[in-house]
Image (cartoon, rainbow, N blue to C red):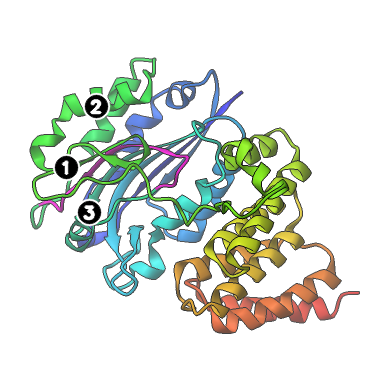
């Protein structure tokens, strides 16, 4: 089966640039697609200094939904949103004061990759951190989700008035230009040996997000931080609820069903886990909302944008009712996803119904994209003229 490769190199223009990210793309682009992917053939998407986070999200979402192995090469710089204290990948227009609106939130990457089956998605990273981000990394892992293998390094801020070099990624590209890709752990070790990152105090990322070569004073990180509490079956539940424990990891089973086109089976399995979580923890619990979000994604994969939109609207409303902030990442993500799926609904009657609910939510959760509420209102006015 063909693989998919996403090459992303991003850094701010001007004096805010910490690393010459785009310089690595010609070297990576010279590597045969199959070698980049570790498969016989591969589709390669290249993003050089993108301007808009939504454009990057669209490409990432398409890559994450593709069948076969996925490898994402990311070169660039990390900056911290000063308001929410969340990491972002800086893009061409990003500044320290606008990162929340012009950068790519790191949790978007995690969200898009979360339904990938274990062993099918790999992130290879060469990132530089700004000072605030570097301090944040002292006590927080750069989480990419439970199913994604992560390799690479995060470098500290370069000296003033200097621009860093993506030495690790260039070493990876140079190794791959020989025409053969070793297993990713070996590729990672070979690249580290070439650049000697440990001597420069870099954070070295190993499979699952483990930080292997932490500099002095940094606490070891856990292998991963799940995207939310995982549903648990309490001892008091019996029958079908208890039976869910022989199934192993349900996310793997769901991913396998989706990739083979068995969408009703995938949704039925997620629905069973959602029901267990609701009975055990309540409808507004993170456990139940996790499974609702999974079902919203499954509806998208099944080509049912109306159901996906409706589910995301329900998730957003539940999070707000539970007291979560309108600008919280989970709330914003749910409304943004509902908005995106609403735009795919073809039935005018259904679109009007969902659009009214979306407009009400958008008035409370404007999100990061300017003019989102105005867009919903314009579309609703157009829908009023349709049958």
Residue 185 sits above or below residue 264 on the image: above
Residue pictured at 42% horizontal, 54% vertical: 50
Gap in Å between the C-alphas at discs 3 and 1? Answer: 15 Å
Where does the image place residue 184, in percent across and percent down from the top left?
Answer: 36, 25
Q: Position of residue 101 (x, y in %)?
A: 41, 69
Provide the residue designation for mark 3: 129
In the visual, does 234 lie left or right of 324?
A: right
Query: Which range is magenta?
Result: 144-158
Q: Is residue 141 left or right of residue 47?
A: left
Badge 1 is on which residue?
214
> Could you tell me which residue is drawn at 59 percent across and 70 percent down?
284
Hey, which residue is sitting farthest right in the picture? 387
First reached walking from the N terminus: tag 2 or tag 3? 3
Q: Residues within 10 Å of mark 2 (few under 14, many from 20)?
A: many
Q: Earlier in the sequence, mark 3 or mark 1?
A: 3
The quadrant of the rendering that contains the C terminus is bottom right
Mark 2 touches mark 3? (CB < 8 Å)? no
Numbered disc 1: secondary structure: loop
Give the answer, above or below, for where 309 lies relative to 49: below
Q: Which residue is mark 2?
A: 191
The residues bearing labels 2 and 1 have C-alpha atoms spaced at a distance of 17 Å
Classed neighbour count for the residue bearing mark 3: other residues with Cα under 10 Å, few (<14), some (14–19), many (≥20): many
In front: label 2 or label 1: 1
Q: Position of residue 190 (x, y in %)?
A: 24, 22
Q: Count neighbours of disc 1 (C-alpha within 10 A) and say few if under 14, some if 14 to 19, many if 20 or more.
A: some
Q: Do the residues under discs 2 and 1 have CB atoms within 8 angstroms? A: no
Residue toward you, 234 or 180: 234
Is residue 298 visible in the rendered structure shown here?
no
Residue 151 appears in the rendering: yes
Q: Nearer the viewer, residue 151 or 97?
A: 151
């Amino acid at each position: 089966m063909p693989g998919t490769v996403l090459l992303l190199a991003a850094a701010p223009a001007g004096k805010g640039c910490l690393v010459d990210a785009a310089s690595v793309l010609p070297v990576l682009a010279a590597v045969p697609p199959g070698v980049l992917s570790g498969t016989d053939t591969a589709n390669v998407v290249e993003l050089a200094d993108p301007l808009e986070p939504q454009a990057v999200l669209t490409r990432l979402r398409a890559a994450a939904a593709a069948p076969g192995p996925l490898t994402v090469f990311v070169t660039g710089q990390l900056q911290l949103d000063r308001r929410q204290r969340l990491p972002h990948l800086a893009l061409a227009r990003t500044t320290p004061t606008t990162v929340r609106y012009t950068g790519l939130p790191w949790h978007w990457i995690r969200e898009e990759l979360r339904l990938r089956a274990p062993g099918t998605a790999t992130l290879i990273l060469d990132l530089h951190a700004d000072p605030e981000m570097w301090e944040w990394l002292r006590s927080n892992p750069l989480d990419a989700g439970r199913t994604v293998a992560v390799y690479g390094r995060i470098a500290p801020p370069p000296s003033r008035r200097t621009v860093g070099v993506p030495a690790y990624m260039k070493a990876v590209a140079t190794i791959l230009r020989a025409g053969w890709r070793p297993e990713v752990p070996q590729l990672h070790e070979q690249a580290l040996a070439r650049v000697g990152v440990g001597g420069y105090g870099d954070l070295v990322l190993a499979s699952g997000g483990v930080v292997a070569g932490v500099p002095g004073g940094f606490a070891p990180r856990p292998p991963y931080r799940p995207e939310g509490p995982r549903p648990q079956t309490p001892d008091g539940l019996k029958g079908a609820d208890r039976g869910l424990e022989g199934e192993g990891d349900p996310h793997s089973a769901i991913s396998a069903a989706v990739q083979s086109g068995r969408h009703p089976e995938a949704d039925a399995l997620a629905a069973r886990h959602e029901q267990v979580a609701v009975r055990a923890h309540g409808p507004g619990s993170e456990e139940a909302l996790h499974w609702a979000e999974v079902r919203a994604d499954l509806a998208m994969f099944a080509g049912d944008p109306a159901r996906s939109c409706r589910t995301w609207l329900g998730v957003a409303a539940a999070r707000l009712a539970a007291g979560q902030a309108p600008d919280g990442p989970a709330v914003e993500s749910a409304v943004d996803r509902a908005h995106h799926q609403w735009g795919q609904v073809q039935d005018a009657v259904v679109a009007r119904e969902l659009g009214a609910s979306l407009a009400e939510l958008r008035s409370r959760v404007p999100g990061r994209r300017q003019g989102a509420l105005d867009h919903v209102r314009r579309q609703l006015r157009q829908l009023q003229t349709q049958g």
